[in-house]
Image: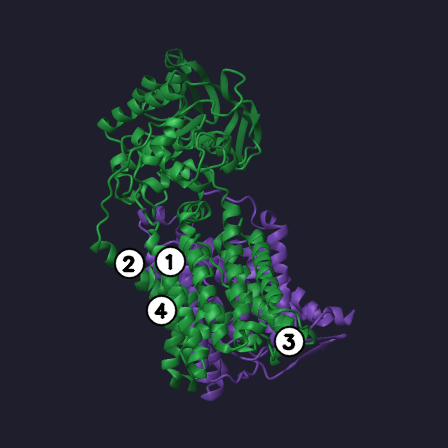
Amino acid sequence: MDLLLQLLFQGIGIGSVYALVALGFVLIFRATNVVNFAQGEFSMVAAFLMVVFAVDLGWPYWLSFLVCLAGMALFGALFNLVVYYPLRHRTFLPVIISTIGASIFLANTTLALYGPQPQMLPGWFETQGFQVGGVYLDSQYLLIVAVTAVLVAFQYWFFEHTMLGKKLQATSQDKEMASLLGIPVAVMIMVTFIYSALLGGIAGILVAPILFVSIQMGGSIALKAFAATIIGGFGDVAGAIMGGIALGIVETFGAAYISVPYKDGFAFLVLVLFLIFRPQGIFGERVAEKA
Amino acid sequence: MKQDAAVIETASFPPATNPSRTGFAGYWCLALVAASAAMLTPVDNYTLNILMQAVTYAIAVFGLTIVLGLCGQINLAQAAFFGIGAYAVGLGTADFGISFWICLAGGALGAMLMGAVLGACTLRLGGHYLAMVTISFQQILTLIMINWIAVTHGPDGVTKIQRPPLLSAPQMYLGFCVMALAMIGFVVWHLPETRLGRSMRAVRDNELAAGVTGINVYQTKVAAFALSALLGGIAGGLFAGGFNYVSPDQFSFAESVVFLTMVLLGGVASPIGAAIGTALLILIPEWLRFLKAYPGLYLAIYGMAVILIVLFMPDGIWGFIKARLNRLVPASRAPGQFPALVLSQDAGRATASDITLEVQRLAKHFGGLKAVDDISFAVQRGSVHALIGPNGSGKTTTLNVLSGLYTPTAGKIVLDGRDITALPTHARTAAGLGRTFQNIRLFRSMTALENVEIGSEHPGNALVTGGRQAHAARARSALAFVGLAARADEPVTSFSYGHQRLIEIARALAGNPSVLLLDEPAAGLNSTEKAELSDLLKRIAAAGPTILIIDHDMTLVSEVASHITVLNFGRRIADGESLAVLSHPDVIAAYLGTEPDAPAGA
C-alpha cells in the first residue's frame, strides 16, 4: 500500500511536468493550428541555462531562475520570428517540418556547446523531503505539484478574466475576425509563443533535478506531453493537464512493475492504443472541413 | 462505341510526361553503364563505402518522395523501416543462416506491413498525429533494438552479415545495388502517371475534392505510407548486406531526420530531387569531416538546413532547377481529336423509377443546432431541381450530407433505388453522384486535363473502357463540352475564376454522374458568365444527368429549374413545380421577410 502511494505521488509529480509542457503545446496549437515539435526543447534549453547560471556561475538559485525566465521569454519570441512567423501563410506541413528542424538544431547546438555529458542541477530546497507514514515526500516533487497547480489557476484567471486573455482566445478561435476587430493578431501569436516558452522553461527547470539535464530530455518530454494532449483531448486545456498526470502515473507504475528499460515506451504504447481505439472519445466529434 | 475507339486511336496525345522509347532505352543504358562501372572500376574501400551508403540511402529517400512528395503525408520513421530491413538481413543471415534473398524479401515485406498497420491506425486523423505516431514508433523500435539483447545483440549490433554467394565481392554487390536503385527509381519516376499516383497527388492537393471525385482517400494514404515503408525496408536490407555490420544508432530518429533533410533539400516532388539530396548530404559531411571533432555540430547544421530549405527553397534544389528549365522550354501542344462527350443518365445502372434521388426525413444536428431538420424531397430523373433558401437555411449542409462529407443524424438517402446513406464519399461517386463546391476545389498542382481525368477515373464510370488514354480522351471531351478544350494542358491556376468553375463541372461530368450536385455555381460570376452557365446547365440536363442545384441567383434558378425545394431554418417550407413554389406565400415571406426575423443558425 505504501509502495502504491509512493508511486502515485511520484507519478503525479512527473505527470505535472508533462502537463505543463502539454499546456504549452495546446496554447500554441490553438493560436496557430500547428503542433510545435520543438516544445520539449524549450524545457531542455531552460534546464541548461539554469545549469549555466546556478551551477557554473554559482548565482543564487532564485536569481538564476528569474534570469532563466527572462531568457526563455526572449527565446520564445525569437523562435516565433524565425521558425513560425515566416511560414504562417503556408500549410501545416512546412511548419511542422520547420519546428522539427528547430528541435534538431537546438538539441545539437546544445550538444556542440556543452558536450554529451549529462549535467546535474541541485533541487530548489536544502531539505530533501519528509517522511509521512510509509510515504516519502520528496521536496522537489512537492514543488512541482504546487507550481503546476498555481500556474493552472493563473492560466484560468488569465484567460477568463483579463482582457489580454480574452483577446488571445479570440485570436485562437478566429484570426480573421479578431484582426477585423482591431486585435493585433501578430502580437497575440507572439505573446502565445512567449508564454508557451515560459511554461516549457519552468517545467524543464523543475524537472531537471529529478532527471539529468541532457540534450535528450527535450525530445522525451515533448513526446510524452504530446501523448498527454491526445489522451486528455486534443486542444483542450483541462484535458492536457489530466492527460499529463495520467501519463505520469502510468509510466511510474509501468517502470516499477513491468520494465525499467522500456519505461519510455509506455507513453508511446498508450498513445498508439488511444489513437486506435478512442480517437473520437478523446477530442469529441471531429469538425469536418467546411466544404 | 467502335467508332469512338477509332477516334481515340488516331488522336495525337501529347506525351505529357511519358518519355519516348529512346528515353526508356537511354535510361536503361545509363543504368547498365553505371552498374558495370560500379563493378569494374577499381576503387578504394573508402569510396566504395560512400557509394554503397549513397545508393542504399537513395532508395530509402525514394520512399519519402512517394509519401511526402506525392501524397503529402509525413513519415518521421523512415530510419525505423530502414532498420527493420537491415536487421532482417543482419540477424537472418548471420544468426540463422537463412538465404540473403529470403531475408531481404522478408524484411521489406515486414517493413511494408508495419507501415500499413501504422498508417491504418493514424491516417484517418490529421497530419500532426501521423508525425507524432511515426516518431513514437521510431523510438519504440530503437528501444527494442537496444534492450532486447537476446535477439538483437543490443548496442553491440549485428556482425558477420552475409551477402548472396554470387555477389559476395563488394563491387559486384554494389553493381547489383545500383541496378536495384535504377529499377526502383524507374518505378517511382513513373508512379505519378499511374492511377494510384494520380490519386496520391489529388489527395495531397485537396482531400475533400479527391473524395468527391471518387478517390478512396484513406486507402490511398495507407498505400503511400506502406509503399514508402517498403522502399525503406528494401534499402535497409541492401545496406546491411553492403556493410556486413549494423548497430541501433544507425537507425535512430536522427537518421530519420537525415532522410527527411535529404528529400527536402533535393526536392520532394521527384526522385531526381531525392537522388540529388542524398548524394549531397552524404558527400558534404565527408568533405566537412573536420566538423566531426565537435559532436552535435553536424546535426545542428542539418536542423538549420531544414528550416532554411523550408523557408527559402520549398521545392528543393531540383524544384528550383526545374522551374528554370520549364521557362526555357515552353509547352506548346496541339489539342488532338476527341469524341463528343457521352453523358447518359443510366449508364450501366438499373433504372426502376422516375425518381433518381430521394431524400427521406434527413437531419443533421451540430450539438444543439439543427442545421438540417427532417427534410424530404425527391428529384425527378432528368430534371433540374433547385434547392433554395435564405442564408443559413441548411442548403450546403444538405449537399454535404448528400455527398457524404457529413454523417447525417437521421434519415435516408436513396440514389437510383439504392440506399447510399452509409456509403463513404468515394463510394457515392462510384454509385453515380458528382458534385462541385461553392469555393472551388481543384487539384492546384495539376493541369485542367489531369483534374478532369481524375474525375473520369473512378470505378463506377462504366462509360470508359480502357486505360489512361481512354480516360484522357474522355477528359478532353468533357473539357470540350464546357468550352475549354483548347486550354486543356494548362495548369488550373492559370484559369480565371469563372473558367475554374467550368473545369470543376467538367471534372464532375467526366465521371458520368447520374445526379450532379452543384453548390452555388453562379457565385462570383459576372452576368455574361452567368448566361453561359445557364446555357451549359440546360445542355447538361438535355444530355442526360439530373441536376440538383443550390443557388441564390433567382433568375438562374427560375430559368433552369423545373422543380424547387425551399428550405428555411433547416426545414422544408415548400416543394414542387418552379412557378408554383416561387409564388408560394411562405417562400415570399422567407425571402422578403414579412415575418419578424428569428436569428439564423449555421
Q: Amino acid at mark 4?
A: Leu
Look at mark 4 in the image and give the residue it sits on. Answer: A78
The amino acid at mark 1 is: Ser
Q: In the depicted view, which residue is nearer to us: A126 or B144? A: B144
Please state, as top left, top right, bottom left or bottom right, where the N terminus of chain A lies in the image.
bottom right
Between label 2 and label 4, give the one nearer the viewer.
Answer: 2
Question: Looking at the picture, do discs 2 and 4 lie on one chain?
Answer: no
Q: Is disc 3 placed on a helix, strand or loop?
A: helix
Q: Nearer the viewer, residue B281 or B552?
A: B281
Q: Position of residue B304 (x, y in %)?
A: 37, 71
Q: CA distance from mark 4 to mark 3?
A: 51 Å
Q: Residue furthest right?
A: A1
Q: Colour of chain A?
A: purple
**In the image: residue B104, left or right of residue B492:** right
From this viewpoint, is residue A97 visible?
yes
Toward which corner of the image does residue A144 lie, by quadrant? bottom right
**Amino acid at pointer 2:** Lys
Residue with the mark numbered 2 = B322
Secondary element at image label 4: helix
In the image, the chain rendered in green is B
Q: Marks 1 and 4: which is nearer the front?
A: 1
Dot 3 or dot 1: first in sequence order is: 3
Residue linked to disc 1:
B270
Write the residue at 45% across / 88% down. Answer: A57
| Same subunit: marks 4 and 3 | no
Q: Nearer the viewer, residue B262 or A262?
A: B262
